[in-house]
Image (spheres, rainbow, N blue to C red):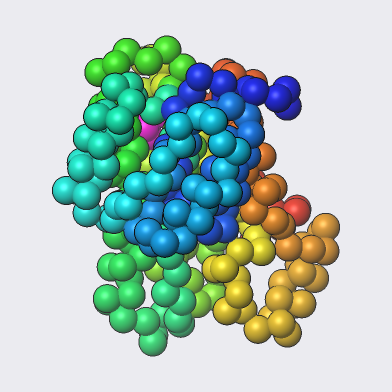
């Protein structure tokens, strides 16, 4: 992709304190975007901010995307800081609370749904309202779902349900917003080498890699590149799509 494909764009990225979100911030900054890094982990998020290519007035904001009041406050801060809507949004924030169905708790389910699905919904809704108010002509919202949302996974009923919901949200929002020049797409990562996979025992990881045709875990940068494609004008005629980035894994 040509360098500078996001010059002049304000890009809001949630889940920016680590993993995929941090890589998206770093790549978008290199491509000329002004990055608004959003996470509930303030210290780690400031480390993300420090890692960005300087010179574009990037900022790091603390918010709990599962709470409407926090999301509303976030967008008020963006409005006050930039007097403009973000024209790129990447919903990357996500958590896991893995357990077998018969052992999982209602609290675990509610926590995962609140961040992964409700949080994506709240940020998408607020971003869409702001883009519509500003009459943006090239809005792009990219939601990070998961291949698990398509095929399920043992021990991840709550996570799979949340990520399947993100797919449905993406497809529905794309139908509503496309006539206003706002595209909504999803990226479906496979098993990616992030802090979220650190808990997986090495023996289990080796078994997983045998199922991946490319025989390796993906890297956060692989997902960031997919997000960049969907955020940029290189994908100007793509909306409602789910781009699988899995090394060939199809569970």
The quadrant holding residue 243 is top right
**In the rendered image, the vertical position of residue 2 relative to residue 193, given as above or below:** above
The quadrant holding residue 7 is top right
Whether residue 157 is visible, yes or no, is no
185 left or right of 209 in image: left
**In the rendered image, the vertical position of residue 86 relative to residue 71, given as above or below:** above
Is residue 173 rendered magenta in the image?
A: yes
- The image quadrant where one finds the N terminus is top right
Is residue 229 rendered magenta in the image?
A: no
Q: Compare residues 82 and 1 and report the one nearer the observer.
A: 82
Q: Name the residue at 57% across, 43% down.
A: 52
| Residue extent of the magenta highlight | 171-175
Q: Name the residue at 29% across, 59% down.
A: 114
Whether residue 216 is visible, yes or no, is yes
Q: Position of residue 161 (x, y in %)?
A: 41, 61
Q: Name the residue at 37% across, 15% down.
A: 136
24 left or right of 136 in image: right
**In the rendered image, the vertical position of residue 101 relative to residue 223, given as above or below:** below
Q: Position of residue 20 (x, y in %)?
A: 57, 53
Q: Name the residue at 51% across, 29% down.
A: 56
Q: Position of residue 217 (x, y in %)?
A: 73, 63
- The residue lying furthest to the right in this view is 214
- The image quadrant where one finds the C terminus is bottom right
206 left or right of 236 in image: right
């Amino acid at each position: 992709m040509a360098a500078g494909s996001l010059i002049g764009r304000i890009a809001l990225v949630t889940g920016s304190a680590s993993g995929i979100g941090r890589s998206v911030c770093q790549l978008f900054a290199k491509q000329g975007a002004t990055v608004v890094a959003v996470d509930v982990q303030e210290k780690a998020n400031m480390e993300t901010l420090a890692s960005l290519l300087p010179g574009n007035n990037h900022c790091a904001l603390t918010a709990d995307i599962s709470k409407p009041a926090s999301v509303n406050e976030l967008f008020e801060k963006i409005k006050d800081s930039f007097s403009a809507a973000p024209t790129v949004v990447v919903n990357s924030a996500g958590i896991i609370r893995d357990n077998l169905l018969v052992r999982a708790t209602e609290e675990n389910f509610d926590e995962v749904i609140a961040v992964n699905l409700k949080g994506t919904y709240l940020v998408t809704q607020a971003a869409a309202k702001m883009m519509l108010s500003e009459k943006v002509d090239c809005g792009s919202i990219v939601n990070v779902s998961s291949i698990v949302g398509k095929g399920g996974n043992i021990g991840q009923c709550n996570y799979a349900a949340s990520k399947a919901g993100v797919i449905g949200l993406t497809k529905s929002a794309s139908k509503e917003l496309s006539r206003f020049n706002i595209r909504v797409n999803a990226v479906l990562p496979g098993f990616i080498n992030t802090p979220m996979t650190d808990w997986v025992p090495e023996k289990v990881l080796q078994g997983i890699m045998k199922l991946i045709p490319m025989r390796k875990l993906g890297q956060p940068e692989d997902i960031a590149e997919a997000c960049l494609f969907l955020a940029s004008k290189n994908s100007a005629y793509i909306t409602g799509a789910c781009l699988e980035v899995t090394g060939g894994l199809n569970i």
